[in-house]
Image (cartoon, rainbow, N blue to C red):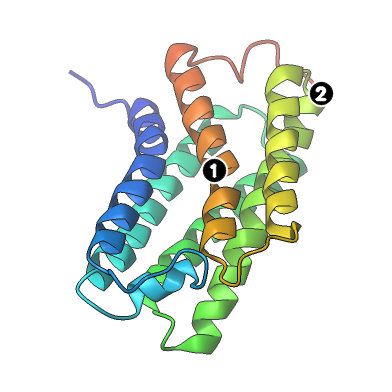
Amino acid sequence: MKFNTLVFSRICGLAAPFVALTFTRIAYQKSPWFQWTKENLSLLGLEGPGKIFFNGGLVLTAILTMIFIIGLGKSLPLWQTLERLGILTLSLGSVALAIIGLVPRSHALPHNIASGAFFILMPLGVFTLGLSLAKYGKLTLAIFSLATAILIIGLQLAPWPWQGGAIPQLLSMLPWSVWMISVAIILLLKPNLLSEQLRP
C-alpha cells in the first residue's frame, strides 16, 4: 500500500491542536503555582517538572503544523504570489512556534521575538490564503479563512481584564486551531477541493 503524503499531512493538521492542548494541560497539572489570570503561558516552560511537557509539546505541535502546511501548499495547483506568500508566512510561523519551545523564557529576547512572530505570522498567513481562495472562487473557505485571521487578531488586541496573558493567548489560538482542524477534515473528505475549477 502506497504511503499518501497528502493524507498524512492532513492527519498531522488534525492532530496538532489536540497535541498542543494535551501537553499544555499536562504541564499545567504539574505546575500548581501557575495562575491563569496572572501569568503568561510561556512560564509553564520555564520552571518545574511541567516544563519539558510544555516545551516539548510546542516543538511537536510545530512539527505537525509544518507538515500540514507543506501538504496544504502541495494541494494548491496554482503557485502564484499569494499562495507562495501564504504558505511561506505559515511556515515561518511554525518555525517561530518551535523556537518558543526550544528557547525558554529565561532567554528573554529570542523567546519574545519568536513569540511575537508566531502571533503575527499565523493570522497573516491565514489571511493571505483567504485572499488567494477568494481570487479563485472558493468563497466559503475564503470567508472562513479571512474571518479566522481577523478573529485571531481581534482576540489579541482586545482589552482583557486579566493581568497575565495566558488566557488571551489561549483564546487567540482557538480560531487558528478550529481553522486547521476544519481545513484538514475538509481536505480529507474532499481531497481535490482546492483544485476543482481553480482558475484566476
Is the residue 120 above or below the residue 130 in the image?
below
Image position, residue 154 (x, y; %): 75, 50
Residue 162 visible somewhere in the drawing:
yes
Q: Is residue 46 left or right of residue 179?
A: left
Identity of the amino acid at label 1? Leu
Residue 99 visible somewhere in the drawing:
no
Q: For the image shown, how many numbered marks are present on the structure?
A: 2
**Residue at the image point whose x is 61% and y is 20% from the top:** 194
Q: Nearer the viewer, mark 1 or mark 2?
A: 1
Image position, residue 56 (x, y; %): 28, 63
Q: Is residue 112 left or right of residue 54?
A: right
Res. 42 image quadrant: bottom left
Is the residue 138 above or below the residue 150 in the image?
above
Residues at discs 1 and 2 in contact (Cβ within 8 Å): no
The quarter of the picture where the N terminus appears is top left
Image position, residue 176 (x, y; %): 57, 42
Q: Which residue is mark 1?
A: 174
User: Between 196 and 19, which is closer to the camera in this rendering?
Assistant: 19
Task: Sort mark 2 into few (<14), some (14-19) or many (20+) by Cα contacts within 10 Å.
Answer: few
Is the residue 139 above or below the residue 40 in the image?
above
Identity of the amino acid at label 2? Pro
Image position, residue 57 (x, y; %): 31, 58
Q: Which residue is mark 2?
A: 200
User: Between 121 and 136, which is closer to the camera in this rendering?
Assistant: 121
Task: Sort mark 1 into few (<14), some (14-19) or many (20+) by Cα contacts within 10 Å.
Answer: some
- Secondary structure of the residue carrying numbered label 2: loop
**Residue at the image point whose x is 32% and y is 67% from the top:** 55
Of the two numbered discs 1 and 2 on the same chain, state the one appearing first in sequence.
1
User: Between 101 and 134, which is closer to the camera in this rendering?
Assistant: 101
Res. 51 image quadrant: bottom left
**Residue at the image point whose x is 37% and y is 60% from the top:** 58
